[in-house]
Amino acid sequence: MFKKFFSAMSLMAAFAICAVPAYGQALKADAKKSKIEFVGKKPDGKHAGGFKEFSSEANVDMATPSNSTLKIEIKTESMFSDDEKLTSHLKNPDFFDVKKYPTIKFESTKVEVNGEEAIIYGKLTMLDKTVEVKVPTTSVVDDTSLKVMADFKIDRTKWGMVYGKGKIEDEVLIRAELFFAR
């Protein structure tokens, strides 16, 4: 599905994301080439969706990846799903309550590069609650761009999103592709 470039040097470069400005290269994600999507499941099926509007800033430190951070801000009103009625329901207080909580924010706290894998740890703030998350990532790096990809799950109930508990799975798959020009 994704091209993966696994050399340790490329991962170190890719996941030296967004830290001490004096040490790195400041980058902003290209919103037209990037995407943040989700898949929620229930016993009789699943629904896919995502967000059309978000921004992401990175500062790539190729020499010291642990100095790095990543910031993402998502506009919740831009949410969509594969079903118009579901999209409307996801925007109401049962789920994202987009009028009261117009943004979702992620800010990394630590980057670890272990051989062929990089993990970005960070704080995900949604519905005015902040929860630590661990995001395994892969990347593709060349002279002109950096593409960071992640597939991971979050437990929606940790943010108080409990509507349909027992009928809708608590874990939601998040898929992100962030494209940065270098």
Image (cartoon, rainbow, N blue to C red):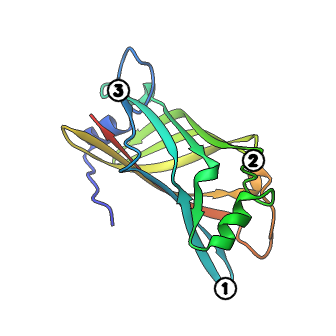
Q: What residue is shown at x 80% (from left), y 74% (from top)?
A: 166
Q: Quadrant of the C terminus?
A: top left
Query: Do we see residue 144 in this rendering?
Result: yes
Of pointers 2 and 1, the one earlier in the residue sequence: 1
Q: Quadrant of residue 27?
A: top left
Residue 46, percent from left and from top: 61, 77
| Distance between mark 2 and mark 3 Cα atoms | 37 Å
**Label 1: element kind:** loop
Q: Is residue 52 above or below residue 85?
A: above
Q: Which mark is residue 86?
A: none
The amino acid type found where label 3 is placed reads Asp
Q: Nearer the viewer, mark 1 or mark 3?
A: 1
- Looking at numbered disc 2 in the image, what kind of residue is underneath it? Lys
**Label 3 crowding class (10 Å Cα cut-off): few <14, some 14-19, many 20+?**
many
State the residue at coordinates (45%, 38%).
Answer: 112
Q: CA distance from mark 1 to mark 3?
A: 45 Å
Q: Residues within 10 Å of mark 2 (few under 14, many from 20)?
A: few
Q: Which residue is mark 2?
A: 99
Residue under circle 3?
A: 61
Q: In which quadrant will I find the N terminus?
A: bottom left
Give the residue at mark 1: 44
Residue 144 position within the rendered picture, expressed as x and y whole percent measured from the top left: 21, 38
Q: Is residue 170 visible?
A: no
**Which of labels 2 and 3 is toward the front?**
2
Percent x, y of residue 160: 80, 53
